[in-house]
Amino acid sequence: MTLDEIVEAVDAGRTVCWSHRGYEVRRTSDKPGGLGMDVICLHNDHMIGLTWLDGVTVNGQPEDFYVKEET
């Protein structure tokens, strides 16, 4: 997923995961774009910014992000 796709999905209320279901992308502030989002580990609450400080470069490979299918 691209940064824009990730931001759009999270803002639409969809669950975006990175690598596996144990890591979710969540909006954590009102900053624009990826700067207001973090990747959170659900097992220990560790988090890292979705993007580098440039607000454009995604932390992780874009192909490793996906929308979790709700069942």
Image: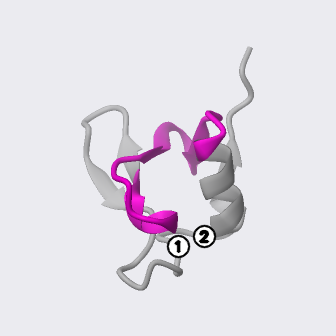
Task: Depth check: give the residue in front, 20 or 1.
Answer: 1
Please report contact status of discs 1 and 2: CB closer than 8 Å, yes or no: yes
- Mark 1, Cα crowd under 10 Å, few <14 / some 14-19 / many 20+, is some
Q: Secondary structure at mark 1?
A: loop
Give the colouring mode of the picture.
one colour
- Relative to 50, does residue 9 appear above or below in the rendering? above
Q: Which mark is residue 61?
A: 2
Q: Residue at x 52, y 80 (%)?
A: 57
Q: Residue at x 45, y 63 (%)?
A: 50
Task: Depth check: give the residue in front, 19 or 50.
Answer: 50
Residue kind at label 1, given as amino acid type: Val
- Relative to 61, does residue 27 appear above or below in the rendering? above
Q: Residue at x 66, y 39 (%)?
A: 12
The residue indicated by pointer 1 is 58
Q: Secondary structure at mark 2?
A: loop
Task: Depth check: give the residue in front, 44 or 56.
Answer: 56
What range of the chain is rendered magenta? Answer: 11-38
Q: Quadrant of the N terminus?
A: bottom right
- Relative to 55, does residue 20 appear above or below in the rendering? above
Residue 25 at x, y percent in the picture: 49, 47
Comparing labels 1 and 2, the label whose residue is closer to the camera: 1
Q: Mark 1 and mark 2: span between their CA atoms? A: 7 Å
Q: Is residue 4 magenta?
A: no
Residue 67 at x, y percent in the picture: 70, 41
Residue kind at label 2, given as amino acid type: Gln
Residue 11 at x, y percent in the picture: 59, 44
